[in-house]
Image: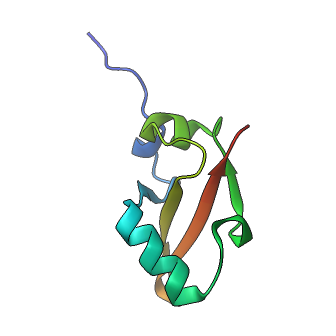
């Protein structure tokens, strides 16, 4: 029996995680922004669906970088 394909298992998909309300508050304060000022990610995005994130959630995306080592991005989940 084969298991269903998980998007997050692919080598080119960076690590995605849904922030807790407390973590989201800290990030918004750190960067002095409102949630709607963050770049958007659609609720229909395959990774968002897999994470079961809902509109209003903030996703932390951690990418490996040859020059920076690691870079972190934040996205607001919006209805898609």
* Residue 43 as seen in the image, left or right of residue 23: right
Q: Which residue is found at the position 61% from the left and 62% from the top?
A: 75
Q: Which residue is found at the position 50% from the left and 64% from the top?
A: 61
Q: Position of residue 62 (x, y in %)?
A: 46, 69
Asked which colour scheme the image uses, the reply is rainbow
Q: Position of residue 34 (x, y in %)?
A: 65, 74
Q: Position of residue 39 (x, y in %)?
A: 71, 65
Q: Position of residue 31 (x, y in %)?
A: 58, 87
Q: Is residue 55 above or below residue 37?
A: above
Most distant residue in the left direction: 1
Q: Is residue 66 above or below residue 44?
A: below
Q: Which residue is found at the position 46% from the left and 35% from the top?
A: 50
Q: Which residue is found at the position 60% from the left and 44% from the top?
A: 55
Q: Is residue 53 above or below residue 13?
A: above
The quarter of the image holding the N terminus is: top left
Front residue (pair 61, 38) = 38
* Residue 4 as seen in the image, left or right of residue 75: left
How many numbered marks have been drawn onto this rendered protein structure?
Answer: 0
The quarter of the image holding the C terminus is: top right
Front residue (pair 8, 73) = 73
């Amino acid at each position: 029996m084969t298991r269903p394909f998980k998007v997050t298992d692919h080598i080119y998909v960076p690590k995605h995680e849904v922030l807790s309300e407390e973590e989201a508050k800290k990030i918004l304060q750190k960067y002095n922004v409102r949630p709607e000022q963050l770049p958007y990610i659609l609720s229909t995005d395959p990774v968002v669906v897999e994470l079961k994130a809902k509109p209003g959630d903030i996703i932390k995306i951690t990418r490996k970088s040859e020059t920076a080592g690691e870079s972190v991005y934040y996205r607001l989940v919006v209805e898609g």
